[in-house]
Amino acid sequence: MFSLLGGIFLGWSLGANDASNVFGSAVTSRMLKFWTAAVLAAIFVLIGAIAEGQAGIETLKGLTQLNLQQAVVSSVAAAVTVTIMTVLGLPVSTSQAVVGALIGIGILNQQFNITGLGKIVGCWFGTPVGGLVIAIILYKVLGAFYNWLNLTMIQSDILIRCGLIVGGSYGAYALGANNVANVTAVYVGAGMLSIFTAALIGGLSIGFGIFTYSRKVMETVGSKLVRLDPFSALVVVLAEAVTVHIYTFVGVPVSTSQAVVGAVLGVGVVKGIKTVSTRTLANIAIGWFLTPLVATGIAIAIYFAIHLQYIPGL
Amino acid sequence: MFGFLFKKQHQIETLIFNYIENFRKTQKLFSEAFTACRSNPFCSDFDFLTKQTHKYESHGDDIRDEINDLMYGKALLPESREDIMRLIESVDKILGHFETILHIIKEQQISIPDFIIPKIDELFTSSLESCDLMLEQVEALFSTQQGIRELVARIDLLESRCDHIERNLIRAVFASDLDLAQKIQAKEIILQIGDISDQVDRVSKRVNIIRMKRIV
């Protein structure tokens, strides 16, 4: 049980950070009470993890052979990486941190599934691009439908509010389905947990993060976000959810933050405005490259550190 | 079917229509007070009608406060809250003009000179006509969404006509034999009446922007 703590911490930090990607705009703009959002997010994360978490878990556990000690090392290395990057103020993807840590263990084992890694890196490129393309399509299609409805102000308000609740719940479902692999896949790889137990523990730890710390993150992140109009905010939430859900079918855990940034850029493309600053994009690019590298380095360092031996008289 | 889920939103809608109805009543009382007593500030009905106008204007404030309380109880999206609040604030300024005009007549005991009364009536009628169109426009914003842009054009036209009458009236007043104090008093009344259509024009443009913002 003690060896699971690294994974649970990772799940907690994932829940605390990524819930803002699905319900952040609704909560910070007071469209939705925090507790309503937290309950919905936690429930749907758990359902998503149990219903569709298997594919991602299979992919990550297939990257390299792990024993229990290596599973704990990779989990702790990923958690430390996420913490360091957050402290540095760089956008961080838990998925990239976990894969980076597994690469570190794979290097030490001199055994790695290159095809699986290629698929994952391809999906990392595809996440922001997917968010962008899906946001453009959704904006055009939903926009035409919304205009056709010719709603009054109050009706439009009710529709968008419901859309944000449904879209946010779907986003939470996709988050659980896609990202639960980051939390507990390594323990499945080490033979410690079954896939169902891994999905359950992963989903619960993400939910725990949402309840205990996501409010603070939502408030901080929300104030730094671009102010979008309600319809665009709805499109961003839906585009992020659809993008992450597509990668769940592919079986690759991806970053919800990168999908959100892609979607916000997509809305900007349709509206002909700049929605994301160059500085933010540069930070994302730096985080994108650094996260897996740092995680690889930390995993190797931790592994060496726990294998240091005191030899008397040397 | 799911109306009970959005009770607050429907309450806001009802209150907005109540506010519009209250505006119409205030406008009617103001019109009666002004028409009856424009040449005689001591006429018998003036006090009563002024008090009634004030009563309805205050009732409008109460409805506005109730709408704000409901909206800030998280009933609407922040953008809609801001739009509705600013819209009602700007409509409320017109009620403020009604009251100010009656107070000026009452407190300064102004009798509008006979030779400008026909033109003042024309300015007054056009201003109130623009108010009617504005109310139609606000109702459309919360119901059918139809004809909002056409109403902007008609209100704009009325506003230009009012500006033209206003300038001619001021010119006529200062070219007359009235003493300077009377000229300044008459000018104040003319400007206040002229301000009604200016404010209506602002409201009308705001309504149009609110509508445009909700077209994707």
Image (cartoon, coloured by chain):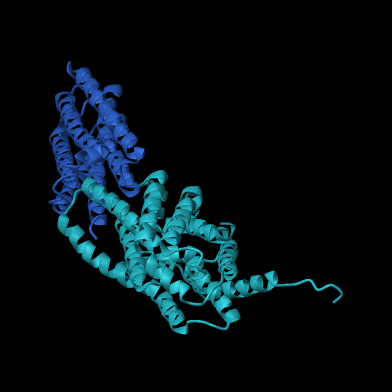
Chain colours: A cyan, B blue
The image shows residue B187 at horizontal and vertical percentages of 27, 36
Q: Residue at x 18, y 27 (%)?
A: B34
Number of numbered labels in the structure image: 0
Instruction: Please identify the quadrant where the C terminus of chain B is shown.
Output: bottom left
Residue B188's place in the image compared with A254, above or below, is above
Residue A160 visible at all: yes
Residue nearest the observer in this picture, B65 or A175: A175
Residue nearest the observer in this picture, A282 or B44: A282
Residue nearest the observer in this picture, A244 or A218: A244
Residue projecting furthest to the right: A313
The image shows residue A65 at horizontal and vertical percentages of 52, 76
The image shows residue A168 at horizontal and vertical percentages of 34, 55
Instruction: Please identify the quadrant where the N terminus of chain B is shown.
Output: top left
Residue A218 visible at all: no
The image shows residue B211 at horizontal and vertical percentages of 22, 52
Q: Residue at x 14, y 35 (%)?
A: B121
Q: For this view, does A264 lie left or right of residue B63? A: right
Q: Residue at x 29, y 30 (%)?
A: B61
Residue nearest the observer in this picture, A83 or A44: A44
